[in-house]
Image (cartoon, rainbow, N blue to C red):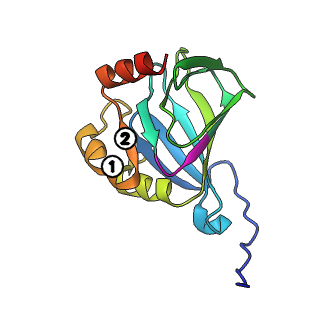
Amino acid sequence: MTVHEMPAPVHRQVDDGTHLTLITDAVTVRVSSAETGGAYALYETETPPSGGYPPHTERYDDVTFVVIAGTYAVLIGNDQVELEPGGHVYIPRGTVHAYLNPGSEPARMLVLVTPGGIHEQFLEEVGDRAGRAAWEPDMARLLAVAPKYGIEFLRPEDADQQQATNR
């Protein structure tokens, strides 16, 4: 039997954590996988009005979104759901998903990624400095790096075709 070192408890204040910008969102790493023994990573994301994350799949990670402010329109496979504060969705690895803030104010959600580690490495490599303008992402760099971490972004025509195939 292998003995693993137990992770130490973690606590943070509201402004603590690593701050990045990814696509349109301000992302704060609330708990890293190193702090949970690789079990999970927890992020808080703030999405501006009309901002969000395009359709994609993740090969290695399961993702859970928990809305804490505003509203998110979330694509999960062929379905779209609207989530308000307290609403949540679990997205198993390999499932096409995306999200959009359809509101007129910023929206916020917690993002739980299991297992931890791979998605964090992706964020470290492609996340921009905190405070970058939301609408100035380097999508070419993001698209080039994503496959290394098992993330595949779908072009709009690919997403439409996949949704039609899954119907």
Is tag 2's residue or tag 1's residue first in the polypeptide sequence?
A: 1
Task: Identify the mark at residue 13; answer none if there is no mark.
Answer: none
Residue at image x 54%, y 49%?
Answer: 61
Vertical placement of 76 versus 61: above or below? above
Give residue 155's position: percent from left, percent from top.
30, 27
Q: Which residues are magenta?
A: 59-63
Residue at image x 43%, y 52%?
Answer: 123
Under mark 1, the amino acid is Pro
Residue 70 in magenta stretch? no
**Which element type, helix, strand or loop, lies under badge 2?**
strand
Total number of numbered labels?
Answer: 2
Task: Identify the mark at residue 152; answer none if there is no mark.
Answer: 2
Give residue 29's position: percent from left, percent from top.
56, 53
Front position in the image: 23 or 153: 153
Vertical placement of 1 versus 64: above or below? below
Residue pointed to by mark 1: 147
Residue at image x 37%, y 18%?
Answer: 160
Front position in the image: 126 or 96: 96
Left or right position of 7 against 162:
right
Give residue 27's position: percent from left, percent from top.
51, 44
Left or right position of 31 against 147:
right
Q: Are marks 2 and 1 in contact (CB under 8 Å)?
A: yes
